[in-house]
Amino acid sequence: MFLGSERVNILGITVDVYSMQETVEQIRQAVEQQVAIRVVTANPEMIYASDRDQRLKKLINSAEVVTADGIGVVWAARRLGTPIRERVTGIDLIQALFPLAATEKWRVYFLGGKQGVAEQAANKVVCDHPGIVWEAGSGYFNSTEEPYVLEKIRRFQPHILLVGLGAPRQEYWIAEHPGLAYVSIGVGGSFDALAGVVIRAPKRIQELHVEWLYRLWKEPRRWQRQAVLPRFVLKVLWQGSRQKSL
C-alpha cells in the first residue's frame, strides 16, 4: 500500500522522511483501500520521552506513519545523515487533508478538547470545506462514559478519526481502540487552533520555524515543556557521535 518509505532513527524512534504531499497520499491510499492505519506526529518532546519509556517507543514505532512534527526533528534527521523533506506537524497535516476530504466527501470525526471546542473547530473547517461530513465529541470523558463515546464513533463509521487528547494519551487511546476509522491521527491541541481558541503564530513566523518561540511567548507556562529541547539536542549529538565512531 505505502510508497517505499525511508525512515531515520532518532533516539530509537523511526521517523518517515515523507513530504507533506506524500503523507497525504499515504492517507488517501489507506482510505481508498480501506486499510486501518495509525499516524503519529512525533515531536522532540515525544521522542525524548520515548527514549526512557520503552512502551511508548514501541507504540510509536508500530504506527504505519510517523511524521516529523517540528523543525527540531527535521534538524535531528539532517544531523544524523538522513534528511527529511519537510516538517509535517499535526495541525498542518490535517489542514492539508481537509481539501481532499471535502472533494471525496469523507466522514471525519473530531474527538478532543473541552466541551464544544471540537464542534466549533469542525464547523469552521466545514465552512471552508463544505464537502466534509462530520461529527464531534469532547475529550473530557471518564471510563464510565467511554463506551458511549466509542459507540458514537463506530456508528458514524469515520474515514478519518482526529484525536486531540494530548500526547501521549491520544496515541495510547488510538492503539487501544483499533479499527474505529481507516486513518486515526493524534492531533494534540489542533482543535483549539482550528476553533480560534488559540491563535497560531503569523505565517512568517511559521515559515521561519520559530512557532515554538511564539507559543512560549504567548503561553509562558510552556517553558517546562520547552526545556526538553536542549536535552533532545544533546541526545541527538551524542547519537551522531556514536554513529561516526562505529
Image (cartoon, rainbow, N blue to C red):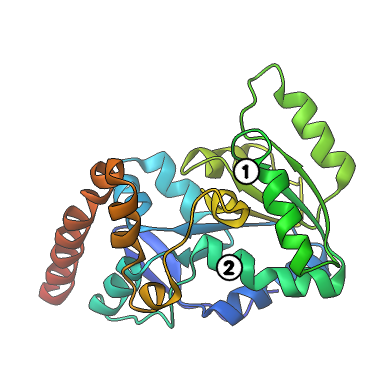
- Residue 186 seen in the current view: no
Q: Secondary structure at mark 2?
A: helix
Mark 2 burial class by Cα count in 10 Å: few <14, some 14-19, many 20+:
many
Q: Position of residue 107 (x, y in %)?
A: 83, 57
Residue 202 vs residue 162: left or right? left
Determine which residue is flagged by label 1. Answer: 174
Rendered location of residue 65, percent (x, y): 56, 64
Amino acid on which disc 1 is placed: Ile
Q: Earlier in the sequence, mark 2 or mark 1?
A: 2
- Residue drawn at the location 55% of the way across and 77% of the way down: 20
Write the residue at 49% across / 70% down. 88
Residue 15 appears left or right of 165: left
Rounded to the nearest whole Å, what is the CA distance between mark 2 and mark 1?
18 Å
Q: Residue at x 29, y 79 (%)?
A: 78
Name the amino acid, label 2. Leu
**Residue 177 location (% of width, % of height):** 68, 38
Residue 92 sits in quarter: bottom right
Mark 2 vs mark 1: in front: 2
Please state if 208 lies on the left or on the right of 119 as rendered. left
Secondary structure of the residue carrying numbered label 1:
helix
Query: How many marks do you count on the picture?
Result: 2
The disc at residue 225 is none
Q: Is residue 110 visible?
A: yes
| Label 1 packing within 10 angstroms: few (<14), some (14-19), many (20+) | many
In the rendered image, the quadrant that contains the N terminus is bottom right
Q: Quadrant of residue 140?
A: top right
> Which residue lies at the image location 12% right of the left edge and 70% below the top edge?
241
The label on residue 93 is: 2
Quadrant position of the C terminus in the picture: bottom left
Residue positioned most to the top: 144
